[in-house]
Image (tube, grey):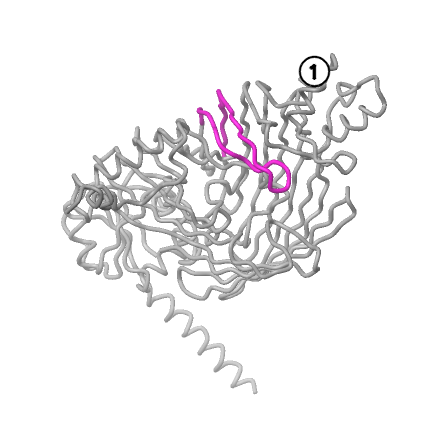
């Protein structure tokens, strides 16, 4: 046997799930969580690991040949809304546990990624602390975003659920309190976020949020849930290196454009445009009344990234529905209403340049109204078949798109 | 016609009382707590006691969930899916029968469960609610 052949031998020990998003340092904690789970799985008997999972198989297509919405176009597509997730939880002691959730999304070519990976310590009967890669709970349904089975929509309303990242790495403290007839669930989070995010129609950019802190509290009174959330960071960065915009029919790199502004002595305007070491805030309120026969709910959120091209993003939806024996009917209206704050900070002397600057200052501004109608059928105790038709009306471009989707969403 | 109406009313009332008596289960524990706390434990909001369930197909479980927890099986399933996949709570254990629940509760002073047959409650165990 020649040495050449020996070298070509496959590595027998290398049979493991490859976790694609693990290469970046941002996932160090997630990797620790995953490694801890693997270690604990060898130390513990197999039956001490709780396995569970959920998934969604969705198909959708727009009705008009030029229509595009939520990653779908006029060809039937199974990828954007489909996902599978497997969760493993191991109890290391009465109070300490480790959990990982590994997910495969159609929108990311079904590559495996670690969605959650955390250690949980139960401090008291009503308080616990999580450390690791966690979900950043901006919205009422953020925590369950991927578990379509648990909510009535086929997908959460995109008018509001539009922050282009879901997770952070850090700590979270959870507390339940009972005051009179009210239950208060409070969560306080601290950490940072580093990820490639979708910024303008499919373009990705490196983003980083440091010193991220915030909280959310839900007050539950019988069938009524009310929620407030607030988060902030003093160091938000979105790279402009990969972003382009169309100026006078020419593809212009925004990073280059900002550099040329600086060279032209307009550094102040360039700094007002780029998102670098800026302060970001997010505030949201939500309400849901659900008496099991029917439900009605709404959310309103505001996101601001000061001294950047990101406008003040104001988002809202109103949803209502009725449940019957084994099916449900619901409708949702939502809208985005973004506003460029203090536009005078983008003033430049040259009128032609001003037109370009204004365009750069408006690249992510949206003003879109969404109307959805959905019907759900319980086809098995742990599976729901959902149909949805969503109409999107873009007030800025005067274009409208219609998307029809169907999905089976399940837990196991 | 009047007779028929009376007959239907009596029949309907009879069916109602039958269906009510068919499901008189009891909530059992060694520790006294109020009905609100029972609902909170089965909604995963409180851990003051460790709750155990009967199987999903059990009529006693359905009656317990509707009357004391205030939710139907489907709603609770969605609710617990949320808790499980967000690390908010660990699903409660399911035991096969009244006898298994009673046995668990006898050896767990911090346990709570429900059974269909009140006569099985003995020793240190107390009936803390009926449904």
Chain letter of disc 1 in the image: A
Residue at 31% x, 47% y: name it: B91
Relative placement, left or right, of A399 versus B66 is: right
Q: Is residue A155 above or below residue A27?
A: below
Residue at 77% x, 38% y: name it: A249
In front: A318, or A58? A58
Q: Which structural element holds mark 1?
A: helix
Residue A144 in the image: state x and y as whole percent.
46, 45
Which image quarter: residue B109? Answer: top left
Which image quarter: residue A40? Answer: top left
Read off the magenta span: A189-217
Relative placement, left or right, of A102 versus A49 is: right
In front: A79, or B45? A79
Regarding residue A131, the answer to whether it shows in the image is no
In front: A300, or A190? A190
Q: Is residue B125 above or below residue B118?
A: above
Whether A193 is among the magenta residues is: yes
Disc 1: which residue: A262
Whether B117 is among the magenta residues is: no
Q: Residue furthest right?
A: A351
């Amino acid at each position: 046997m020649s040495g050449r052949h020996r070298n070509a031998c496959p590595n027998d020990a290398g049979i493991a799930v490859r976790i694609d998003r693990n290469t970046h340092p941002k996932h160090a904690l997630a990797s620790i969580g995953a490694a801890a789970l693997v270690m604990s799985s060898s130390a513990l008997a197999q039956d001490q690991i709780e396995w569970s999972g959920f998934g969604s198989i969705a198909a959708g297509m727009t009705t008009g040949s030029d229509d595009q919405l939520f990653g779908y176009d006029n060809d039937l597509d199974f990828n954007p809304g489909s996902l599978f997730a497997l969760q493993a939880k191991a109890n290391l002691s009465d109070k300490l546990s480790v959990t990982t959730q590994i997910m495969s999304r159609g929108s990311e070519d079904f590559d495996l990624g670690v969605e959650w990976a955390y250690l949980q310590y139960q401090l008291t009967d009503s308080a616990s602390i999580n450390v690791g890669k966690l979900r950043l709970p901006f919205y009422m349904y953020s925590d369950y975003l991927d578990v379509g089975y648990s909510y009535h929509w086929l997908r959460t309303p995109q008018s509001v659920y539009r922050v282009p990242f879901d997770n952070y790495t850090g700590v979270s403290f959870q507390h339940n309190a009972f005051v009179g007839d009210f239950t208060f669930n409070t969560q306080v989070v601290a950490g940072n976020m580093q990820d490639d995010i979708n910024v303008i129609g499919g373009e990705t950019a490196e983003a980083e949020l440091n010193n991220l802190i915030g909280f959310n509290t839900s007050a539950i009174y019988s069938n009524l849930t009310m929620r407030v959330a607030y988060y902030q960071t003093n160091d938000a960065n979105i790279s402009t290196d990969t972003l382009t915009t169309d100026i006078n029919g020419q593809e212009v790199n925004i990073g280059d454009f900002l550099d040329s502004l600086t060279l032209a002595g307009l550094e102040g305007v360039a700094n007002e445009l780029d998102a670098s070491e800026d302060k970001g805030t997010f505030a949201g309120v939500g309400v849901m009344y659900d008496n099991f026969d029917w439900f009605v709910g709404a959310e309103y959120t505001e996101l601001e990234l000061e001294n950047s091209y990101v406008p003040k993003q104001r988002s809202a939806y109103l949803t209502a529905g009725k449940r019957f024996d084994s099916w449900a009917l619901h409708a949702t209206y939502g809208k985005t209403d973004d506003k460029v704050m203090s536009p005078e900070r983008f003033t430049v002397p040259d009128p032609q340049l001003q037109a370009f600057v204004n365009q750069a200052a408006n690249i992510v501004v949206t003003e879109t109204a969404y109307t959805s109608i959905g019907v759900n059928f319980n086809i098995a105790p742990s599976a729901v078949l959902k149909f949805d038709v969503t109409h999107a009306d873009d007030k800025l471009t005067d274009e409208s798109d219609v998307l029809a989707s169907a999905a089976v969403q399940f837990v196991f | 016609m009047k007779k028929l109406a009376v007959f239907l009313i009596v029949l309907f009332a009879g069916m109602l009382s039958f269906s009510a008596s068919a499901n008189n289960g009891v909530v059992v524990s060694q520790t006294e707590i109020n009905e609100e706390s029972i609902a909170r434990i089965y909604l995963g909001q409180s851990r003051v006691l460790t709750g155990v369930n009967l199987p999903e197909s059990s009529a006693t479980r359905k009656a317990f969930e509707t009357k004391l927890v205030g939710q139907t099986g489907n709603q609770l399933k969605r609710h617990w899916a949320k808790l499980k996949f967000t690390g908010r709570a660990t699903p409660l254990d399911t035991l096969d029968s009244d006898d298994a629940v009673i046995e668990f509760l006898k050896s767990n002073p911090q346990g709570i469960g429900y059974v269909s047959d009140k006569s099985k409650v003995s020793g240190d165990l107390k009936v803390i609610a009926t449904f």
